[in-house]
Amino acid sequence: MYNILKSNSEIWGQFSKKEEYSPKQLDSHERFNYSYSMHKDVSNPNVSKYLIQNGFQVEYPNNRKFAVCLTHDIDDIYPPLTHTLLSSFYCFKQLNLKELKKQVSWKITGRTNSPYINFRKIMELEAKYDAKSSFYFIASENDPRRFRYNIEDIENELKFIVDNGWEVGLHGGYYSYNNLDEILSEKRRLESVLGKNIIGFRNHYLRFKTPDSWKILSKAGFKYDTTFGYSDMVGFRNGMCHPFKPYDLNENKEIDILEIPLAVMDVALFDVADSVEDAWNYAKKLIDIVEENNGIITILWHNNVFDNPFRSSWSLLYEKILKYCYEKNAWMTNGAEIWNWWNDGY
Ligand SMILES: [Zn+2]
């Protein structure tokens, strides 16, 4: 694959993301953003197209045309006070007392009744469309905004997720993305609660440094990462709408990890779109492009969007995406299954 890409220097520069090696600018979270990139046409997966023009072929189980990698970053399992206040305000305005009760009663009846411990409900929704997903959990104590949660509190939930064929992976801590020891200790903590090894990773806030983050994750024993997308745009960060093994331009060699690039994060989608309708049009356009190129589109919907009165339009859009892809007969699955498939055949 590298030989084909290397034969065109422009394509190679875009694929390997040369511009991110010594960036002139980073944002306040030290991220390389879409706004700093010279590749502006991110809804066009031109590197994947170039590979296909040169003989690259992809097949999916049951002859499906394309795949959707469904993922959830679990930033909260208990609504922070700001969410509870906003939710209560919405419920009150709509006179929805049942929902209001759900949003506040867990504070009295116990934290296990928190509306954001909603993995089973998300799984049920996905199962309706013959889909499965990955849940990435935080196992770090440190966070710039607030303490998030103790992963030990939801041991049963984690086991339920994997026992049913969904995936549990690590949502790397905000401060850990460039620290092998921290990532390793978070991985071990999550694995000891789960009682199983994990293979998938995405970092909190999409903090990522090209190519160092891939090297650290590979050393930590992860098989795939799915952080590589923009936080300020939707689309294909390096022109790829297929998973790929990243290439280290400093050491001139492949990095032993699979990147399943992130194309659509809910927050970014609603930032770039003017309305829910507009957000749907963006998502639909990217899905259609991925279908045309037999690719994989990775979608990130935070769990705190579900069971959240002030984000109900976001969760409805998620279901609309599921329905659309189901009707197109896409393979809708989690990162681990995509890694398995890719590892066997490519
Ligand atoms: Zn996060």
Image (spheres, helix red, strand yellow):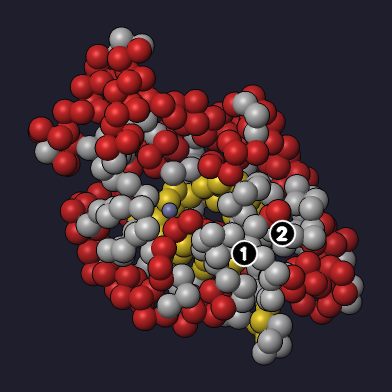
Q: Quadrant of residue 105?
A: top left
Above or below 210: residue 130: above
In the image, residue 286 lies at what x, y percent? 70, 42
SS at mark 2 in the image: helix
Can the viewer see residue 327? Answer: no
In the image, residue 300 lies at what x, y percent? 52, 47
Lateral position of residue 246 relative to residue 310, left or right: right
Above or below 299: residue 27: below
Count of numbered circles on the image: 2
Lateral position of residue 230 relative to residue 140, left or right: right
Tag 2: Cα neighbours inside 10 Å, few (<14), some, or many (≥20)? some
Query: Which is nearer the eye, 116 or 324?
Result: 116
Which residue is disc 1 drawn over? 26
Residue that extends furthest to the bottom in the rendered view of this protein: 251
The span from disc 1 to disc 2 (Cα, nearest Å) is 8 Å
Q: Are marks 1 and 2 in contact (CB under 8 Å)?
A: yes
Q: Quadrant of residue 312?
A: top left
Tag 1: Cα neighbours inside 10 Å, few (<14), some, or many (≥20)? few
The amino acid sitting under disc 2 is Tyr
Marking on residue 36: 2
1 or 2: tag closer to the N-terminus: 1
Q: Quadrant of the N terminus?
A: bottom right
Instruction: Determine the residue positioned at 59% across, 26% down.
Output: 276
